Image (cartoon, helix red, strand yellow):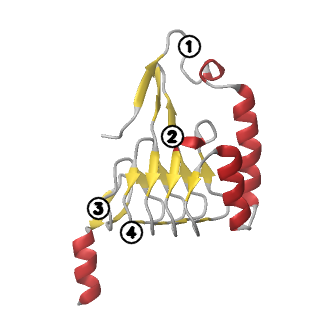
Amino acid sequence: MRKTESYPVKGPNSLWQLYKTISFWKVARNFVVVQIGRYTPFLGMKNMLYRSFLKMKIGKETALAVMVVPDLLYPERITIGKNTIIGYNTTILTHEYLTHEYRLGDVTIGDDVMIGANATILPGVTIGDGAVVSAATLVHRDVPAGAMVGGNPMQVIYTAEQRQNKQTT
């Protein structure tokens, strides 16, 4: 299971009640910063924007490719380690707004991780150090350190030990 906190709502669905749960101005600011970050090709500038304005924790020499979308509502719940690559058009979510509740969960991505293009990372997920996530993967549960995962739903392709054995043979 993913590590999320659940908050029930009464009345209309939780997304309809969005601005009862988060400030409109925070969402507006985050939207502008994310749009600038999505299109900038300057990795250092993008990391600075995300660290300064969105309060994301991003390690040294981490690269978020063009069009990566960090969560607009709760980006401060995203932690990315050092020397990690997040591929083109990947989405990192820390919230889920459902019919009768909304859920929040931290996303932690370790050091030396490689995430392929068009992946979607759901709230409450941890991706371990040295993991590889193939393109177009729906990351709906934790990824062990060193593992290679892929698919929708995500499956472990190789464990860290299997990857190590393949590299030595």
Closer to us: mark 4 or mark 3?
Answer: 4
> Which of pointers 1 and 4 lies earlier in the amino acid sequence?
1
State the image coordinates of residue 46 (x, y, percent, origin top left). 70, 59
Left or right, residue 67 beside residue 160: right
Residue 156 shows which numbered tag? 3
Q: Amino acid at mark 2?
A: Thr
State the image coordinates of residue 15 (x, y, percent, origin top left). 58, 24
Q: Compute the Cα span from label 1 to label 3.
A: 38 Å
Category of crowding for the residue at label 2, using alpha-carbon neighbours closer than 10 angstroms: few (below 14), some (14–19), many (at least 20):
many
The residue located at (51%, 65%) in the rendering is: 82
The residue singled out by tag 4 in the image is 130
Q: Amino acid at mark 1?
A: Pro
Front one among 15 and 165: 165
> Which of pointers 4 and 2 lies earlier in the amino acid sequence?
2
State the image coordinates of residue 29 (x, y, percent, origin top left). 75, 38
> Which of pointers 2 and 1 lies earlier in the amino acid sequence?
1
The residue singled out by tag 2 in the image is 94
Q: Compute the Cα span from label 1 to label 4.
A: 42 Å
> Which of pointers 4 and 3 lies earlier in the amino acid sequence?
4
Name the image quarter holding residue 152.
Answer: bottom left
The residue located at (40%, 34%) in the rendering is: 4
